[in-house]
Image (cartoon, rainbow, N blue to C red):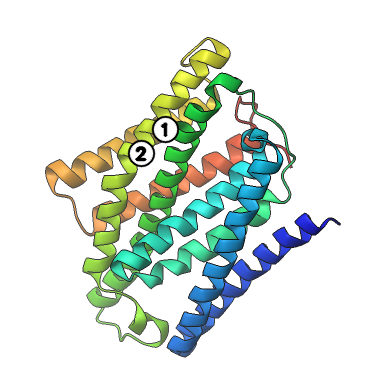
Amino acid sequence: MTFFRLFEFLVAFLYFAGALVFLVGLVTHKTSFTKVSIWTTATSFGLHTIDLLVTWLHSGGLGADQGPFYFSLLAWCFLVIFFAFWWRLRMKFLALIASPLALIVFTSSLAISPSTQPVPQTFVGLWFGLHIGALFVSIALLAMAFGSGVTYLYLEKKIKTKARFKGFSRDLPSLHTCDRVNHVSVVAGFPLYTVGILSGFIWAAFTWKHMFSWDPKEVVSLLIWLIFAYVFHQRLAIGWNGRKPAKAAIWLFLLVIASMLFINFFVPTHHQFQM
C-alpha cells in the first residue's frame, strides 16, 4: 500500500470521525462535541483538498477525466457548500447531511476503477469547469436542500401533533431557517445545473458529434432539469415556501442520487463507471 493510499484512508477516517462526533454531540447536547466535529471535518476537508491537488498535478491534469476523481471532487463539493452555509448563516445542522455524504462518496471514490472518459484535450478546461464544476456545486446545493427539507417536515409534524421537543430535536433550527436553506439552494442551484447541462450538450457535440443522443444519463439529466426548473419557477414566480419546496427538493435530490448510483454503474451509457 502506497503512502498516497494511506493518506486517502486518513481523510476517510477523519470524515467518519467528524460525522460520528457530531452525532454524539447532537444526542448528548454537548456543544464541545459539535465544535470538535466541525474542526475534525475541516481538517479532513483540508487534507482532501491537498489530495485533489496532488492527484491533479501528478497526472498532469489527466486525473480529471477519471471516475475516482469525479467522486472525490463531488464529496469535496458537499463540504464546500456546507462550510459556506455554516460560515455565512451558521447553519451547522447541515453537517448531519454533509458529513455522511462526504464520507460515503469519498470512500466510494477509493473503490472505483480509474476508467477514463473521452475528453478532447483542447476542451478539457471548459468542459471540466462548466460541466462538472457547475453540476457538482448544484448537486451539493440540492443535498443541503434535501437535509433542510427532511428537517422541515420532521419539525412541522412535531408542531402539528403538538409533540414535545425532546432529545436532539431541541437543537434543530426553526422552520424559517430550513425554508431559507431551501430557497438559497434552489435559487443558486438551478442556474448552475442549467449551465452544467448546456455545457454537457456542447461537449457531447464535440465528442460524439451529437448534442443529444438519447443516452440514458442524458435523458434522466434532462428530466431532472425539467423538475428543477418547475421548482425554481414555483419558488420565485408563484411564491412557494415551506412544505411544498421541501418535499420537492427531497424527491429531486433522491432522483439525482439514483441517477448517479444506478445509471452510472449499471446502465450502458457514455458516463459509465466501474467498481
- Using the image, determine if residue 88 lies above or below residue 143: below
Q: Mark 1 packing: few (<14 Cα in 10 Å), some, or many (20+)? A: many
**Where, by quadrant of the figure, is residue 228 drawn?**
top left
Q: Residue at x 52, y 81 (%)?
A: 36
Q: Is residue 9 left or right of residue 127?
A: right
Q: Quadrant of the N terminus?
A: bottom right
Residue 110 position, x and y percent, is 71, 51
Q: Indicate left or right for 200 with 267 as reference.
A: left
Pinpoint residue 184: horizontal percent, then vertical percent.
27, 53
Q: Label 1 vs label 2: CA separation?
A: 6 Å
Amino acid residing under circle 2: Leu
Residue found at x 39% / y 25%: 198
- Where does label 2 land, which residue? 192
On screen, residue 49 versus residue 205, left or right, reads right
Q: Name the mark on residue 163.
A: none
Indicate whether 209 appears above or below 133: above
Q: Quick one: quadrant of the C terminus?
A: top right
Q: Amino acid at mark 1?
A: Gly
Residue on which disc 1 sits:
196
As helix, strand or loop, the secondary structure at mark 1 comes to: helix
Q: Are marks 1 and 2 in contact (CB under 8 Å)?
A: yes
